[in-house]
Amino acid sequence: LSLGLIHRYGADAWAVPRHGTAHVAAMSACVLLTLVQAVFILKARHHYTVDVVVATYTVPLMWHFHNTVVQPADLKVDRAHIEKAIEADRDRPLWQRIALVIQTILMLAFLVLALLVIVHGNFRFIGVGGHPASSIAGPHGW
């Protein structure tokens, strides 16, 4: 996947010639790192060999399908639209900026709370909801 990203967007992002020395070097390093990653995954026994082999040819095929069928036209950066959005943000009143900061903080707090609930499986980490585990445990502690 990273090779596809570098192949399609790397030259424009780094302002280097497409398929120039720097662009080809980045793609070659990506291929080398992908091969090393595949070997490490197999050595660590995290996947079967067939999983790694199938992923090695499935991901580039899906990338090619997306670029040729789903979205054939490359997305071009509309710098005028970006400048217009920046100017509109600069002209925003102070109370709207403060409201946006408060909304962002509340959303991040909610996401942290949701992550804690997912990790712990309940609300006991804040002292809400039910008995502590020691009071409901059986005679053997489980």
Image (cartoon, grey):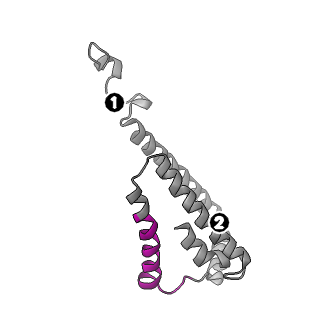
Toward the top, the furthest residue is 139
Q: Nearer the viewer, mark 2 or mark 1?
A: 2
- Does residue 81 appear anywhere in the picture? yes
Q: Residue at x 47, y 86 (%)?
A: 72
Q: Residue at x 64, y 74 (%)?
A: 10
Q: Is residue 13 visible?
A: no
Q: Identity of the amino acid at label 1?
A: Gly
Q: Residue furthest bottom?
A: 73
Q: Residue at x 56, y 67 (%)?
A: 2
* Residue at the disc numbered 2: 29
Depicted 141 relative to depicted 34: above or below = above
Viewer-closest of 89 and 110: 110
Between 23 and 97, the one lying in front of the other is 23
Q: Earlier in the sequence, mark 2 or mark 1?
A: 2
Q: Quadrant of residue 81?
A: bottom right
Where disc 1 sits, the SS reads loop
Q: Magenta includes 79?
A: no
Q: Nearer the viewer, residue 8 or 139?
A: 8
Q: Is residue 45 left or right of residue 141?
A: right
Q: Specify the segment rendered in magenta.
A: 54-75
Asked if residue 67 is among those painted magenta in the image, a careful observer would answer: yes
111 over 2 or under it: above or below? above
Task: Give the class, few, some or many, for how many residues have Cα within 10 Å of label 1's Cα (few <14, many ≥20).
Answer: few
Q: CA distance from mark 2 to mark 1?
A: 52 Å
Q: Where does residue 70 sit, x and y in percent of width and height?
A: 41, 81
The answer to whether the residues at label 2 and label 1 have Cβ atoms under 8 Å apart is: no
Q: Quadrant of residue 83?
A: bottom right
Tell me which secondary structure the magenta stretch mostly adopts.
helix
Q: In which image quadrant can residue 89 be found?
A: bottom right
Q: Amino acid at mark 2?
A: Ala
Residue 129, numbered circle: 1
Q: Is residue 126 left or right of residue 76?
A: left
